[in-house]
Amino acid sequence: MTRFNRRVILVKRPTADATPDCFLVEDEALEPLAEGQLRVAVEYISVDAGMRTMLRGEGYHRQVALGGVILAGGVGRIIESTLSDWSVGQAVRGGLGAQTLATVTPEMVERVDDGFGPLSVHLGLLGGSTGVTAYIGMEQVAKVKPGDIFAVSAAAGAVGAVAGQIAKKAGAYVIGIAGGQRKTAFLVDKLGFDAAIDYKGQDVSAELKRLAPNGINVFFDNVGGAILDAALDHLALRARVVICGAISQYDDMDHVTGPSMYLRLAERQSVMEGFAYFHFPERMEPAKAQLSEWLAEGSIVLPEEILTGIDAYPEALQFMFSGGNLGKLMVKAS
């Protein structure tokens, strides 16, 4: 029986927004598996901010080729296998792409535990670019102490929401910066942040001065640009600035706007350090173990927003680029 894969192809590089005409959703007939291959029915596909640079063909992240399947992390189950130690029904995670059926080899995927409920959690709280990134950044770089004033940008996103909750666990006073009243209310009412700033409706610098009159001890940045400058201008002595991402800059990586307030680092004997989770391979498994424990006890949560159907992938990208999602954004492939 011939299997058909429905996949999202990049047919035109976006010059501004990634509009639907940049993509083609098509069906392809799949060949029988070759020796050493696995076939995975993709259940959930990750939608990430870094896709902005991947579609444009420039920048820090991997690049999507014209005519190629959109690169994306995914999670699903093996439905065909040529290898005895990779069983049909096994849940796996990896670079499965924006498609319904992925043909892969074992080094492209990893086994995951399906005992936490929907497999989406392995792209959300237990995902490498989400919960694991937040955990490693907090443990290895931020190093929050009890009593610290901690601020995080893109606080209602997949990384920021987890980083803020970890800071609360460490005994910090937590300020989240996010766009819109829906998000700021969620941070305070649902995640337990001490305060939240709506950068779309409030003056970030003035609010930081009001909420942290003695300065910020740790700033965890996912945005860059003007928000990073505002935080730098309100650092306490010997503060730590963690650079995790810079989503405000991804639209034009050839003309990145650097922080104009960087001299505050010298004035206040502070440090700024960037990282990615894969810089700390030895901490990935401990991170997953601790996040799994917190997940099981319900002491850390990460909201998921899921669009249904592979054809919704271009719509999901637009939703993310407009900053509409709360928590982790995904597409349920079928």
Image (tube, rainbow, N blue to C red):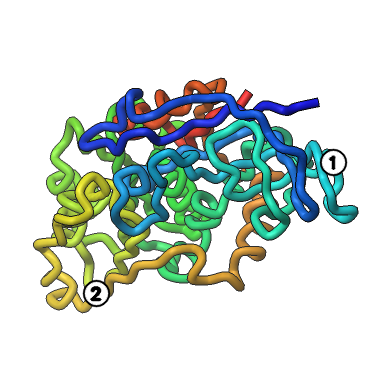
Q: Is residue 224 visible?
A: yes
Q: Is residue 140 left or right of residue 289?
A: left
Q: Which residue does the image show at 45% across and 53% down from the upper left?
A: 163
Q: Which residue is pictured at 37% across the width and 48% down the height?
A: 54
Which quarter of the figure has residue 125? top right
Residue 14, quarter of the rendered image = top left
Q: Which mark is on residue 270? A: 2
Q: Alpha-carbon neighbours of circle 1 within 10 Å: few (<14), some, or many (≥20)?
A: some
What whole-number distance in Å separates the C-alpha atoms at marks 2 and 1? Answer: 52 Å
Q: Residues within 10 Å of mark 2 (few under 14, many from 20)?
A: many
Residue visible at 46% across and 43% down?
158
Which quadrant holds the N terminus?
Answer: top right
97 to 319, vertically: above or below: below
Report which quarter residue 4 is drawn in: top right
- Which label was assigned to residue 232? none
- Secondary element type, mark 2: loop
Residue 293 rendering spot, x and y as whole percentages: 69, 52
What amino acid type is highlighted by mark number 1? Val
**Residue 88 tag number:** 1
Farthest residue, direction right: 84
Q: Residue at x 90, y 53 (%)?
A: 84
User: Residue 278, how many percent across, how many down?
Assistant: 51, 66
Q: Quadrant of the C terminus?
A: top right
Q: Earlier in the sequence, mark 2 or mark 1?
A: 1
- Compare residues 197 and 328 and report the one nearer the observer: 328
Measured as percent of width and height from the top left, residue 212 is found at: 23, 54
Instruction: Specify the amino acid type for callout 2.
Output: Ser
Q: Looking at the picture, tell me which residue is in the foreground, 64 or 73.
A: 64
